[in-house]
Image (cartoon, rainbow, N blue to C red):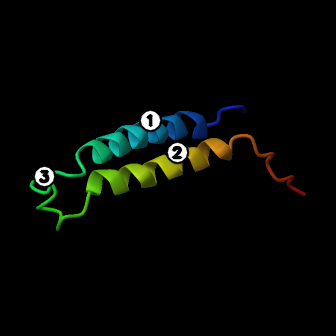
Amino acid sequence: MGLDIKIPIGLMFTILGLLLTIFGLATGGNAELYSRSLGININLWTGLVMLAVGVLMLATVKRKPLKKE
């Protein structure tokens, strides 16, 4: 069966991660917005992690599966 779920999930993580990263960069100087998260830019860090996971999933699509013996 040729169904590979990594492509749509990888695209979803990549797009949402990119959006969160851009939002985190745009609102990075707003200390009041991040006061509840102890001053950590949670949008930026979550976006970067989601972007990395999405790119990793899309990168594994091109790999050949291991042969079963």
Q: What label does residue 33 carry, if any? A: 3
- Amino acid type of the residue that numbered disc 3 sits on in the rendered structure: Leu
**In terms of secondary structure, where does tag 1 sit?**
helix
Residue at 44% across, 55% down: 49
Q: Nearer the viewer, residue 11 or 68?
A: 11
- Crowding near pointer 3: few (<14 within 10 Å), some, many (20+)? few
Q: Nearer the viewer, residue 53 or 69?
A: 53
**In terms of secondary structure, where does tag 3 sit?**
loop
| CA distance for labels 1 and 2 | 8 Å
28 w.r.t. 16: above or below: below
Residue at 27% across, 57% down: 42
Q: Nearer the viewer, residue 22 or 17?
A: 22
Residue 65 in the image: state x and y as whole percent. 79, 48
> Toward which corner of the image does residue 45 lie, by quadrant?
bottom left
- Crowding near pointer 2: few (<14 within 10 Å), some, many (20+)? many
Residue at 57% across, 45% down: 55
- Crowding near pointer 1: few (<14 within 10 Å), some, many (20+)? some
Which one is in front in this view, the residue at disc 3 or the one at disc 1? 3
- Amino acid type of the residue that numbered disc 1 sits on in the rendered structure: Ile
Pointer 3 with pointer 1, Cβ within 8 A = no
Pointer 1 with pointer 2, Cβ within 8 A = yes
Q: Which residue is the site of mark 2?
A: 54
**In terms of secondary structure, where does tag 2 sit?**
helix
| CA distance for labels 3 and 1 | 23 Å
Image check: 2 left or right of 64? left
Q: Which residue is the site of mark 1?
A: 15
